Amino acid sequence: MVKIYSCFDTSDKFLNSTDISLIMSNEDPLNNWMFLLGKWKGGSTDLSGSEGETVSTATFSKELGAFIMGKIDTFRKSKLESANMSMMFFDHREKRFKRKTFFSDGVVHDEVEVEISETEIVFEVSLESPPPAFDGMRWRSYVRKISDTEVCFGLLTAKNDADFEPYGESILVKSE
């Protein structure tokens, strides 16, 4: 392992030598999620409060050496209903995962890990440009590894101080 020394105090927001060594090693937490790379297909029933089945296709790739980029298209009755692009990464300074997701309706999710296990990351979601119908709502999203060839993406919502409830969930199977 290459040891790189930093002239910055570890209390600064700059990466220190331990952080840089971790990034350069195989111990990067993002490695646990590399199974996502490739093409996926799946769907759900009654997704996001709408009735009926949806079909989703997804492609994930590793970009810029430190990001997992995702593109998901969701169809209902063969018509594109929603599309999104996301960038997930491990923030070595804050020592947690983050994700930024851009939706076709203009809503942007800023997501920060609040819970993690070997098979699941739960993100607290802050919305940029939310529609008025979302006022007073809190959001969480999650990605759950079922196996190397099956993954679950979901969204939870809560009104004010109420408990989180499912908003929608899709299970995808690796197709390539």
Image (spheres, grey):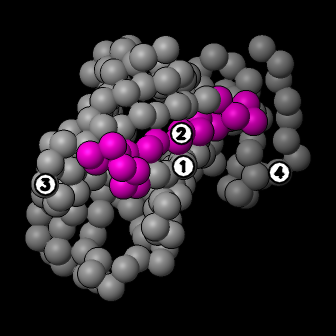
Which dot marks residue 31? none
**Residue at the extreme front:** 78
Label whose residue precedes the other's in the sequence (2 or 4): 4
Q: Nearer the viewer, mark 3 or mark 1?
A: 3
Do tag 2 and tag 1 residues touch (Cβ < 8 Å)?
yes
Q: Position of residue 28 (x, y in %)?
A: 59, 26
- Local packing at callout 4 (Cα closer than 10 Å; few below 14, some 14-19, many 20+) is few
Q: Position of residue 19 (x, y in %)?
A: 69, 36
Who's the residue at 49% across and 51% down the image? 84
Location of residue 3 (image quadrant):
top right
The range drawn in magenta is 62-82
Amino acid found under the numbered disc labelled 4: Phe
Who's the residue at 49% across and 24% down the image? 39
Label whose residue precedes the other's in the sequence (2 or 1): 2
* Residue matched to label 1: 85
* Residue matched to label 2: 70
Q: Position of residue 37 (x, y in %)?
A: 54, 23
Label whose residue precedes the other's in the sequence (3 or 4): 4
97 vs 57: above or below: below
Which dot marks residue 8? 4
Amino acid found under the numbered disc labelled 1: Met
